[in-house]
Amino acid sequence: MTTTPLPDAAGRFGDFGGRYVPETLVHALEQLAEQYEAARCDPAFQAELDDLLKNYVGRPSPLYFAKRLTEHCGGAEIWLKREDLNHTGAHKINNTVGQALLTLRMGKKRVIAETGAGQHGVATATACAHFGLECIVYMGEEDIRRQAPNVFSMKLLGAEVRPVTSGSRTLRDAVNEAMREWMSCVETTHYILGSVVGPHPFPRIVRDFQSVIGRETIEQSRLRLHSLPDVVVACVGGGSNAAGMFHPFIELDEVSLVGVEAGGRGNQPGDHASPLTYGSPGILHGSFSYVMQDEDGQTCDVHSMSAGLDYPGVGPEHSYWKSTGRVSYTSCTDDNAMQAFDALARFEGILPALESSHAVAEGMKIARKRKPDERVVVCLSGRGDKDAAEIARLKDQSL
Amino acid sequence: MSAIDELFIRLRSENRKALMPFVTAGDPNLDFTAAVIQELVARGASMCEVGIPYSDPIADGPVIQASYTRALDHGVKLTNILQTLGNITSDNVAPRLAAPLVTMVSYAIIYRHGLEKYADQLVKQGVAGMIVPDLPLEESSQLANVCKARDLSLIQLVTPTTPRDRALKITETSSGFLYYVSVAGITGERTELPPDLVERVSWLRENTPLPVCIGFGISQPEHVRMLAPVADGLIVGSAIVRRMANAKKDPAATLREIGDYVATLVAEL
Ligand SMILES: Cc1ncc(COP(=O)(O)O)c(C=O)c1O
């Protein structure tokens, strides 16, 4: 494996990444990269972040042995990295407290964010409430419908939720709208992007803040398993929980890494949200990476039952890991994810987020094929409470 | 030398300024696009910017976004857009279009088609250059080389958030003209333009031999009167595209309305 730290100064992970944005944003992105670099090397910043992660977020999150699920699958041991137990119920908070601290450091008082499932919106609203920052969240109308409880939470936390009615009215359009808004307020406002996507330095910043997941998993594996896991699995929307989980493992070649995209209802364009599996390299949201596009370069509509995975692009570092072969990427259908949701609920008493259920499904599949002395760690990126209404709708049941 | 270079040499020697309207290609259809470009030029436009519809235009406000969406919903394709432009720039049409065309196009689209292929198509269809709003200086060297080899202008943008030393670097790589974005923000009509706009543009114009044109927010005759003296040209987009929304219902009336509107701006140059 390469030992040069990535991304390079131009924000490239191999061929991928970069900064394809309007000139209006370039200066702010350069400043952000500089300020982040200074913060990263500042022990006081790191100490404050560590304190927040411990006492506010509730880290470290447990590494939990899913005994009954393991017995049910009848193969390798399945362990869950419990990001669902973080404050606000998902991994998203790891990034938002970090970026909120960065916002303060840059002397900005106002934050905007996009959200799909609403988890990033809630996590941003939460961090902003904690620090007394003004917070505006852009959310597609379709997602507002699918994730109503999170919309309500954001409002309770003092954030303003602005519905996005353009395009497919999902995460991709919310990113567009947040970028547009940022263009006119970039001097006073920080944009807390919620995944490892977008122009440099966002993919790097978000990956670094999420890498606490992988670092803890390595430490906990050494303590509890007395070795590293054989396989680590995470779901990939934009790719932040996966990047945070995988990055610390990248040079540990003996550990297989598997990213799971949303396979939706089939492999035809428009039926899934799996750019790494079915897409090709192109430009979206300021970065060069795998994307679902038509022959003219127009972004395709995508589908996933889980709002957090319903995104046509993916972080550039994942494209890089795909190109080097270090991480293998696969996809999991809506139906298989739903079966995994049910299994985790019944066998372990855990309601996973629909996003995370995709990783659980793949983890179960891998476990079945492996021997009982092997270990599969699944990143359980979030809890499923937010999905209750949508699951009832999908199962034709009432709440 | 591209047709844009020639245009500004002529305008500067005659001490005249350019009005450059922006139209979306394919809204509501390509016949209208061809007709509106011809009308605009007949009414005194010196150049036309043709917006290639894109699904995720992050630099555009609601008016242009909606127009792009309408065009894409009607299934407009890049090949057909460029053919349409080729038809009106051809030597065989009379009267010959007396103004160069440039495409405003996302790098997502150029990359997908291939840089050289896209540039070759522009040359073939008689288009003089391109503005790529999501391709900043650092990412542009490859496309700049492709354009240079074909005498196409690659027009770069400078904005209110661009520091002066960076602005100077951008002037060195831009060709055709320099696009000064009047406001920090997205496209769209503004009643008020920033108070320091004249000063910023004047500084830039003193520091580059390139023509400087101002765009974003310009919509009113007073804007033209105020800005024409300090710039080489003015770009008007949303104010025209807003009027295009009626083109499907009544193309003839829309053409006339847009033509009349642009004539009132040209009169203020
Ligand atoms: C619980 C959960 N997991 C995963 C995701 C997908 O995002 P990412 O791929 O950036 O981790 C989301 C996004 O909203 C989420 O809420």
Image (cartoon, grey):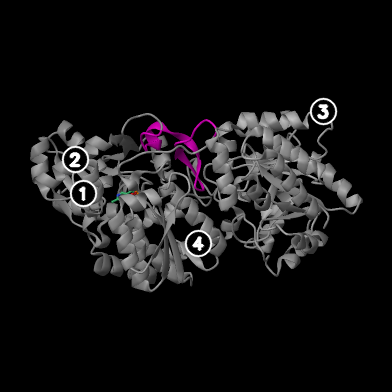
- Between the residue at mark 2 and the residue at mark 3, the CA separation in whole angstroms equals 65 Å
x then y, percent, for residue B75: 55, 32
Q: Which residues are magenta?
A: A270-296
Q: Name the mark nearer the viewer: 4 or 2.
A: 2
Count of numbered circles on the image: 4
Which quadrant holds residue B249?
Answer: top right
Specify the amino acid type for callout 4: Leu
Front one among A60 and B245 = B245
x then y, percent, for residue B109: 57, 37
Q: Give neighbour class at mark 2: few <14, some 14-19, many 20+ (Cα, 10 Å).
A: many
* Res. A372 in view: no
- Between the residue at mark 1 and the residue at mark 3, the CA separation in whole angstroms equals 65 Å
Q: Name the mark nearer the viewer: 1 or 4.
A: 1
Which badge, 1 or 2, is on the more N-terminal residue? Answer: 2
A324 to the left or right of B161:
left
Residue A340 bears which disc, if any?
Answer: 2
Q: Which residue is mark 4?
A: A32
Q: Are marks 2 and 3 in contact (CB under 8 Å)?
A: no
Q: Are marks 1 and 3 on the same chain?
A: no
Which badge, 1 or 4, is on the more N-terminal residue? Answer: 4
Which badge, 4 or 2, is on the more N-terminal residue? Answer: 4
Specify the amino acid type for callout 1: Pro
* Chain on which label 4 sits: A
* Chain on which label 3 sits: B
Is A306 covered by the magenta stretch?
Answer: no
Front one among A288 and B196 = B196
Q: Which residue is mark 1?
A: A352
Q: Which residue is mark 3?
A: B91
Specify the amino acid type for callout 3: Asp
